[in-house]
Amino acid sequence: MSQLSERPEKPVVGVPMPHEAAGLHVTGAALYTDDLVHRTKDVLHAYPVQVMKAHGRVTALRTAPALEVPGVVRVLTGADVPGVNDAGMKHDEPLFPDEVMFHGHAVAWVLGETLEAARLGAAAVEVELDEQPSLITLQDAIAADSFHGARPVMAQGDIEAGFADSAHVFSGEFQFAGQEHFYLETHAALAQIDENGQVFVQSSTQHPSETQEIVAHVLGVASHEVTVQCLRMGGGFGGKEMQPHGFAAVAALGAKLTGRPVRFRFNRTQDLTMSGKRHGFHARWRIGFDADGRIQALDATLTADGGWSLDLSEPVLARALCHIDNTCWIPNARVAGRIAKTHTVSNTAFRGFGGPQGMLVMEDILGRCAPLLGLDPMELRERNFYQPGQGQTTPYGQPVTQPERISTVWRQVQDDAGVADRRREIAAFNAAHPHTKRALAVTGVKFGISFNLTAFNQGGALVLVYKDGSVLINHGGTEMGQGLHTKMLQVAATTLGIPLHKVRLAPTRTDKVPNTSATAASSGADLNGGAVKNACEQLRERLLQVAASQLGANASDVRIVEGVARALGSDAELAWDDLVRTAYFQRVQLSASGFYRTEGLHWDAKSFRGSPFKYFAIGAAATEVEVDGFTGAYRVRRVDIVHDVGDSLSPLIDIGQVEGGFVQGAGWLTLEDLRWDVSDGPHRGRLLTQAASTYKLPSFSEMPEEFNVRLLENATEEGAVYGSKAVGEPPLMLAFSVREALRQAAAAFGPSGVGVELASPATPEAVYWAIQGARRGAASRNGELPAAAAAEPAHTGAEALSGA
């Protein structure tokens, strides 16, 4: 067992415990960025001047009327920027644009004594626009050949030979929607300037170091003149990885120019209409199977809807390509990617970061092709699993470690769910109920863990031990409700060998741990846990030397367990507090800076080859649904999940992450339906689903009636902190089982052997049209077409399969 994964005697990691701030959350005592405004004097409020057109050039911007509004202090424009007028890392996102690129784009910001004064001032600013043609949909952009960014191609084997050897070849298209983050806390920042001109920004950001970098380059100052702190976030899900930077820069610029604190916070409508979403995708594919249903070749093109700027679209697309295989070995593959440029908000990171989009393409292909191959969908998936001992690699050339876990969780979830017996019960139910059908689907997940960009796979920490024996830890990760801080407390207490109550955690700040990576890519516990462990190990080694001198033993024979140092073979002991006090008087350093870098990664973005991931997280889910044949309405009856988190650092946290990820994935795949005005009218490009009243989120009524989650046992991950695995993103893809169950339930309304198309999101309307498609399959065998089919909309999110 590696030193990183080995657990000491009586570890605090692995103990189920609630979130470290759970009590604060439920009582309302937890502070978020905007709560700090009420503790700050003389705060100004920032409000955006939005242009409600999808595309156009600003020909005039008159701010004088705003300054006549009582309470307005200043209007910020591009002329006020002393540094670089850009909010992104690609320098394609002007902070104060002279070209409007989406409906609601902010061209200036008003600072007011009150939020209402700022709002009225923003309404008074006069903007003249030379309106230009706009591309709103992904189809618009593809037709107009509107693309930006890299166009990677992933290739392995010989696809033409693979297709030649295929007994069955199918082709098709599939377009699926994005997703709104809908975190509870909207984007927020509070900026202050001290007497030395030092900028201090409180920001709801997943990436404080990058927020610091953007603020510094907008202000034209060095990074050491800017400090960014993230106390906590009320949710992030990727939406606060890149997008908070410009908003923080607006607040910082306002503070710099006025000398007063400046607060920025979106209301819900502004957040929905001005911040990016999960990328919607279009896929065109051709796949070949041998006579036994094993994949021989895949040729596909994935097009991501990037929105108006690149943001993180390139790495999102790269991860989508890297995950199109999911659990399937594809010996011959060619997958191309491209990013469409549309006049909508700039799409960004979202839990899974392109992985769900790539994996959904494969799961959709398997779900559609299984009936045409005469195979049960579960059987088709299982036949294509990566197999141990075969030397199989992913289409980008990385060996798949622990492929046996794919089959292990697959079997375990079937046993836990009683799949065989329940499918017989479902068949009997369906035979007796012509207007209501049930189905049970099982799908798997193989998700790579690490940042696509190798350089991001590093973490830092600062651990301080005080004379009284108390411990304060700082690390580079941010807390957005996912329980990272809880795990870091457990890691520190375990490594030092002390009770948890001895350890406290400080808010994430750039002046404590510099140059951090975003808390993203499910890497927060791996990177920061490794760094915290490293820092604590340095301190422990120093303290063991002190303890050894006091106990009359060799340092290698001393153990610190539950806050007491003891020498092997001796009854002598030394309490932690006394040990620390003794170390202080011996002038032993009681602070340490820790660092961790993920080893074994390499990636060539140009050739699209390498081993970009440290390991793969594995899982499987079995979902049963019931569908109404008259309306397409459905309910999720039961969900069973077995998920691999290695040796869990904090089981209660991890089970919560699995449950939450699954529900969020189910929302994306079945409920959450983003709609824009695509007419040629005056509101073209406007987001229509800009509130919870029009954008349906999962609620208690969508929860499965029975929900069982089990963590894979005996699953130590060598080379990861205390044998754990990442948990943040992988469970989201377990929700593929919901969509596939809905497809199979819809198919049950028709004859066997008919491939059923299902749009995504699979709303009740989409399920209804899938049912109609299944019924048409029955009617076409009788030479008839149901009259209801004439009412079907032209676009259902997918085009028909063609077989060759």
Image (cartoon, rainbow, N blue to C red):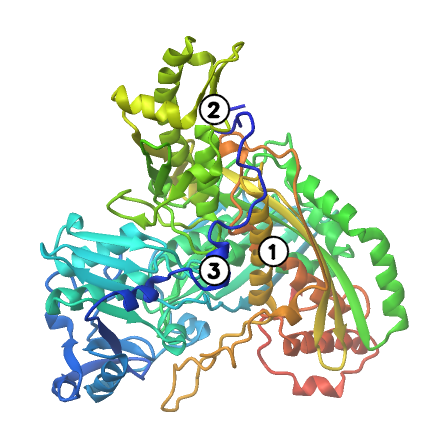
Asked whether, in this view, residue 728 is left or right of residue 217, the answer is right
Amino acid under disc 2: Val
Of the two numbered discs 3 and 1 on the same chain, state the one appearing first in sequence.
Answer: 3
Does residue 641 sit above or below 140 in this rendering? above
Q: Quadrant of the N terminus?
A: top right
Quote the CA–CA distance across marks 2 and 1.
38 Å
Where residue 699 appears, as percent x and y from the top left, is: 60, 70
Quadrant of the image containing the C terminus: bottom right
Q: Which residue is mark 3?
A: 25
Q: Nearer the viewer, mark 2 or mark 1?
A: 2
Q: Quadrant of residue 113?
A: bottom left
The local crowd at label 1, few if under 14, some if 14 to 19, many if 20 or more residues have their Cα within 10 Å, is some
How many residues crowd around disc 3 within 10 Å: few (fewer than 14), some, or many (20 or more)? Answer: some
Which one is earlier in the sequence, the residue at label 3 or at label 2?
Answer: 3
Question: Where in the figure is residue 659, as x and y percent of width and height?
Answer: 60, 56
Residue carrying label 2 = 564
Mark 2 residue crowding within 10 angstroms, few (<14) / some (14–19) / many (20+): some
In this rendering, does residue 623 appear at all?
no
Give residue 766's position: percent from left, percent from top. Answer: 64, 75
For label 3, the SS is helix
Asked whether 155 or 323 is in front, the reply is 323
Q: Which mark is residue 728?
A: none
Q: In 3D space, how far apart are the residues under numbered discs 3 and 2 (Cα atoms)?
A: 33 Å
Q: Which residue is mark 1?
A: 659
Dot 2 falls on a residue whose secondary structure is: strand
